Amino acid sequence: MKSAFSQGKVRSRSRSIGAALLLAVSGMTMVGCSGGGGNGGLEIGASVPPAPPAQAAQLIYKNGTVLTLDEKNSVAQAVAISDGRILAVGASNAIEKHIGSATRVIDLGGRTLIPGIYDAHSHLVFAGTNLLFEADLNSPPIGPVQDLSQLLSVLEEQRAKLGPDAWITGFGYDDTLLAEKRHPTRADLDRVSATQPILITHVSGHLAVANSVALALAGIDAATSDPSGGVIRKDASGEPDGVLEETAVQMVGGLKPPLTAAQVQAATQAISALYASRGVTTASDGASGADGIKALEAAAQAGDLAIRVVALPTSMSGLDTVDLKSRKVKIGGIKTFADGSIQGYTGYLGQPYHTPFHGDASYRGFPRADREALAQQVLGHHKAGRQLLVHGNGDAAIDDILHAFRRAQEEAPRSNARHTVIHSQTVREDQLDEMKRLNVIPSYFILHTYYWGDRHRDVFLGPVRAERISPARSTADRGMVYTIHADTPVVPMDPMRLIWAAVNRVSTSGAVIGPAQRISAIDALRATTINAAYQNFEEKERGSIEVGKWADLVLLSANPAAVDPSAIKDIRVLETVLEGKTVYRSAD
């Protein structure tokens, strides 16, 4: 938009100058004919002042394929950058006029430049603390753990690194990928330690398992009731078996000693560098708190934050104590939850799960919050002018979310709220129609098709519902704005695999999950750049390569829109640029 507007002003100004010159020449001719003269007029033959030279750029990329992702998805060859912003975009020979004596010129040699990846939803700080301080319990294709014996061995290794009083923690186990096809229990974890508390988190982030020591610290026993929005699983004798669902996780997790500020800053430094190496220039930190936002700001002030972060707090609590001075940290909308995870059997579905949960053929999951309570929470923030980003995987949960959004708009109409349903995994066609009517943005965790597609088809949802998870094509066909995301640390941050998944929808077994919901590479790129910027009210500043916007760029080894679709996941990030400065460069 800015580029077109700027060019329009230049054309208008040129016409005005031309008209003025015609009038001047006419006047001079008339004066000459009448034989008069004048001291203040232009003399015949006087020269017109030359046009001012073009502004010199500090940095120019030329001779490449520049996917601008502007409104027309224009393709250029070169980009000029000055003071961190895009000065010009166009053909290489047209951009050369911006070369000055101090301009750094980079010949792309035909390689592809795209806007910086804008992460629509992940958990940056949580991913960083997992990276540095948690045992990796992931199964293939992410990690090595294939059975309970291996899982316990990894925890033994973690215990050996820690002091005798430390909590032993891990992240990423997936019961459906373990050979035993079950969750670990308190008895399993007690084999690692009967004296230290242990808490391990399911790959979904919505369940956890505690050992006997941790359960005792939380006061959880046979008499303990389930918390609202959560479940304490119990065995046949009525004793807790160690598995905690949803809000029950916090009953134990809230007892863990907090990491020190130095530890959080180290984690933030490590994970932001990793995100930068994947081409991410703006990340999301979903479910932030005031302390986490302060840690991000401290990292930014210390020069330890490689990229920008949009923090999504779960409430306004403590935010009045947050003082943001860095442009690298921004507080976005409010993140809240309507349900849990389908692969954890806690997603709230309209129809029962395909495979009965614990033999209950009527089981549909459960809401994380009461429908009326969710509506009141949404209404309060909506009336205050805040954006809501509500986690919803199951279609019954999405019904509750849309009920809340509809009621909020009826009571306090807002034309540009940009409320978002995070994940929108089993959204129905009628719900998409309602989203469009309410101007709600669906944000799809589209890597479900790869990592869990086979199990959604065979275990959780059945073939019909599995075909329609993350229905990006249905959304695009309605002309709606939508985004795609990785939800890291649930899966690794890998935008090229994310785009590949949206284009191909291939599972780990090689099966295609919902071919009718595939989208083009350009649409997938837009969903993780300009659309994601729009989701966070930043589309005028970031998300596309246009004049006036911040120069957030990624240099790729190949063009995602030109390679064989199956090869998109193999494209490498060669360089990541944030506001005109390189924050990552590969060794290649």
Image: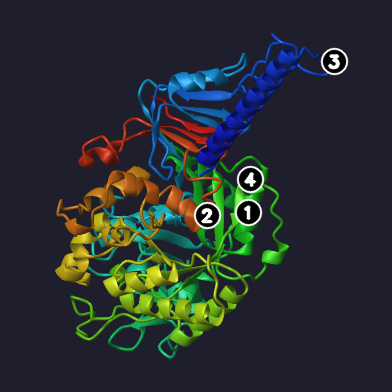
Q: To which residue does mark 3 refer?
A: 39
Q: Specify the quadrant of the image occupied by residue 290.
A: bottom right
The residues bearing labels 1 and 4 have C-alpha atoms spaced at a distance of 9 Å
Q: How many marks?
A: 4
Q: To which residue does mark 4 refer?
A: 300
Residue depicted at x 57% and y 38%: 548
User: If you read the primary sequence from the N terminus, does the residue marked by circle 1 or circle 2 appear first?
Assistant: 2
Q: Is residue 289 above or below residue 267?
A: below
Q: To which residue does mark 2 refer?
A: 125
**Whole-percent x, y for residue 587 in the image:** 42, 26
Identify the element where label 1 is drawn: helix
Q: Is residue 390 above or below residue 549?
A: below
Residue depicted at x 50% and y 39%: 4
Q: Are marks 1 and 3 in contact (CB under 8 Å)?
A: no
**Whole-percent x, y for residue 515 in the image:** 18, 56
Please name the amino acid that badge 1 sits on. Ala
Q: To which residue does mark 1 refer?
A: 295
